[in-house]
Image (spheres, coloured by chain):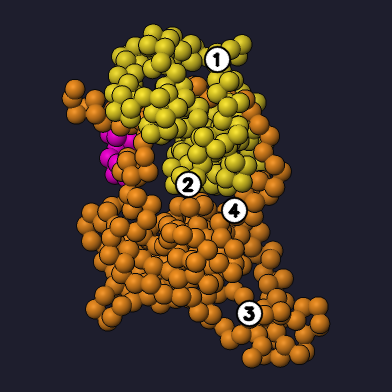
Chain colours: A yellow, B orange
Amino acid sequence: MLTAAELVGLLRAVAAGDQAAFERLYAATRAKLYGVVLRILRRADLADEVMQEAYLKIWNSAGQFDPAVASPITWMVAIARNRAIDLARKKRDISVEEAPEALEFAAEFADPLAGRERSEELRRLLDCLGRLDPEQRQLMLLAYYDGLSREQLASRLGRPVNTIKTWLRRSILAVRECLGS
Amino acid sequence: MTSDDDRDVLAAEYVLGTLDAAEGARAEALVRSDAGFATLVRDWERRLGELHAGIEPVEPPPQVFERIRQRLSGAEPSGAQVVELAEMRRRVQRWRNFGTAMAALAAVLVALLVTSVLRPDLMPARVQPEGPAAGRLVAVLQQDAASPAFILTVDIDQRVMTVRRVAAQQPSGKSYELWLVSKQFPKPRSLGLVGAQEFTTGTALAAYQPETISDATYAISLEPEGGSPTGEPTGAVLWGGKLIETLPAARP
């Protein structure tokens, strides 16, 4: 992975229509974005489709990227996740129960961040998530990593949808408070 | 529990992805129409986005970039989303140098195409067209003289579609949404919103096979602003129609 500053430079070049820069940007970020969308969609054909849409969107919106607001990779991941979740909601047939990989993901879920390098922002976020009730922390992480809807979260955690809704709200407000809105 | 909190929770859930399709579409429409809400979403993307560090990178198949490149050079921007023509023109400019180089080749191809349409028997056997001339298909969609009219043009090779509004005013708080109806799919598939400008161009058809595109019925419905909240047409279907070819078939 290139440094954030290098990615910012590439995004600027892409915004100016530089195709070679776009290719380098793709090479530097494709594995991260594919990891994100594949985990949510669990089907390679759908993940391929979302990758195309995400990078076309990145090509088109590179000029709107503002390094003061987000890091380049966070911005790109947000675009890819957004597309993946959109597609996941439209295709109801991507059922968690039917996906063979789901169990694998659940097992590895224990601590996806173990042993990884952590940015200062990530440390603060993890600290705040760590203050949540464990089940609510798991809820937030499952929602983020697996892109599950409230209904899917309810069935995964064996809780009523209304409880999930309340927990999400409580956790979101607690995290905001903790990070200092 | 304040309404400010409600908005912030909606923004956070939109970023997390826990909303259902209808709520997600509403939040999406808010992002586009409400700068304050868009800022809330960006803040949550920044806060929660750090979690991506927990995702294991996975190499995508090599053909993914190949397709991205094809869609950029041939079809131009954006997949499922409909792109305004003004934006298209700006983007197209970037690929124009390449286009100039192709022009000479294109002239030869046009000569071949004309020959293939008028005198297919003169064509070398290998390039004689197999079936009807592929290329531009068009549908004129209007219920009666008083109702809004749209002209849908599809370049089937590039799978680019352009919708031209002829007499369709945009009712305030509503959006026109284009649908593909095919017996291959149990439900209509959205091809995106028709923009407020005269021309809207999009590449949503790239996801479909040419046979599906040419056999499908196309419909436009009037939906709440930002599009159907359910993923299916919910408003009045203003018209439906099939594509016809703009050129005569290569062989009678």
Hey, what amino acid is under mark 1?
Asp
Distance of label 3 from label 2 (alpha carbons): 35 Å
Q: Quadrant of the N terminus of chain B?
A: top left
Magenta span: B29-38
Contact check, label 2 and label 1, Cβ < 8 Å: no
| B126 inside magenta stretch | no
Distance of label 2 from label 1 (alpha carbons): 28 Å
Which callout, 3 or 4, points at the residue further toward the start of the chain? 4
Same chain? Circles 2 and 1: yes
Hey, what amino acid is under mark 2?
Lys
The answer to whether residue B140 is above or below residue B208 is below
Q: Nearer the viewer, residue B162 or A81?
A: A81
From where the camera sits, is residue B234 visible?
yes
Q: Nearer the viewer, residue A181 or B88?
A: A181
Q: Indicate the position of residue A161 as horizontal and vertical percent values.
A: 33, 30
Q: Identify the residue under disc 4.
A: B72
Which callout, 2 or 1, points at the residue further toward the start of the chain? 2
Q: Residues within 10 Å of mark 3 (few under 14, many from 20)?
A: some
The answer to whether residue B87 is above or below residue A109 is below
Q: Nearer the viewer, mark 3 or mark 2?
A: 2
Q: Identify the residue under disc 3.
A: B133
Contact check, label 3 and label 2, Cβ < 8 Å: no
Contact check, label 1 and label 3, Cβ < 8 Å: no
Secondary structure of the residue carrying tag 2 is loop
Q: Indicate the position of residue B15 as horizontal and vertical percent values.
A: 40, 31
Q: Identify the residue under disc 2.
A: A91
Q: Residue at x 58, y 12 (%)?
A: A114
Q: Which mark is residue A111?
A: 1
From where the camera sits, is residue B28 visible?
no
